[in-house]
Amino acid sequence: MNRSIWSTKSETIEKPWGNERKWSTFGAIQGKVLYISKGNRTSMKLFDHKDEVLYVQKGKIEATVADEQVFHKSVAKFRKLNLSEGDVLNIQAGCPYRLNALDDAIVVEISSGRPTECVRFIDDYGRHSESDHRYEGVISKFEDAEE
């Protein structure tokens, strides 16, 4: 077996809520550092084939989350989790979530799975996904959670 070590460069991508520094590794593992400015939030979104682990390195985050059941059961609901430095959020593929920065925040993301397009339900910045009938009704449940 021939193993090796190599270096690569990360890439910074500007986002309306801040920016992300992204890097690829071997296989299906990817990493990002999200810099979310206070008062900004990410899209309410999910990934069909990507699991994510989010580590709050700095700041405070309010995460609005739901299990995959939110699409199949009328009683399933979104819930809010308050995360601060050192907290970890595990997100399996198919589970919708949104991050709201209560302070300037740094969040480290490690993900695995096939890279897939982000399915956005709600976005403060006008970015939208093509509609997908599997997710009809999620917007009203999310809006109920926001009240």
Image (cartoon, grey):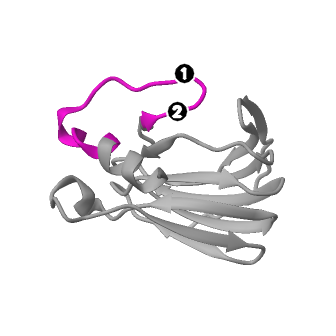
Is residue 109 visible to us here?
yes
**In the rendered view, does 41 fall on the left or right side of 145?**
right
Please report contact status of discs 1 and 2: CB closer than 8 Å, yes or no: yes
Q: Main secondary structure of the magenta part?
A: loop
Residue 43, labelled with which disc? none
Q: Quick check: is 123 in the magenta stretch?
A: yes
Q: Specify whether residue 129 is painted magenta.
A: yes
- Packing grade of label 1 (10 A; few <14, some 14-19, many >=20) is few
Provide the secondary structure element on which disc 2 rests: loop
Percent of width and height locating residue 23: 70, 46
Q: Residue at x 81, y 57 (%)?
A: 103
Q: Position of residue 139 (x, y in %)?
A: 34, 41
**Tag 1 residue:** 126
Instruction: Report how far apart the C-alphas of labels 1 and 2 lie in the structure.
Output: 6 Å
Tag of residue 123? 2
Q: Quadrant of residue 72?
A: bottom left
Task: Write down the region rendered in magenta.
Answer: 121-139
1 shown above or below 21: below
Q: Amino acid at mark 1?
A: Gly
Seen at 45% across and 35% down, the residue is: 122
Identified by mark 2, the residue type is: Asp
Residue 49 visible within the image: no
- Comparing 144 with 94, the one in front is 144
On screen, residue 23 versus residue 29, left or right, reads right
Q: Residue at x 75, y 57 (%)?
A: 102
> Helix or strand or loop: what does disc 1 sit on?
loop
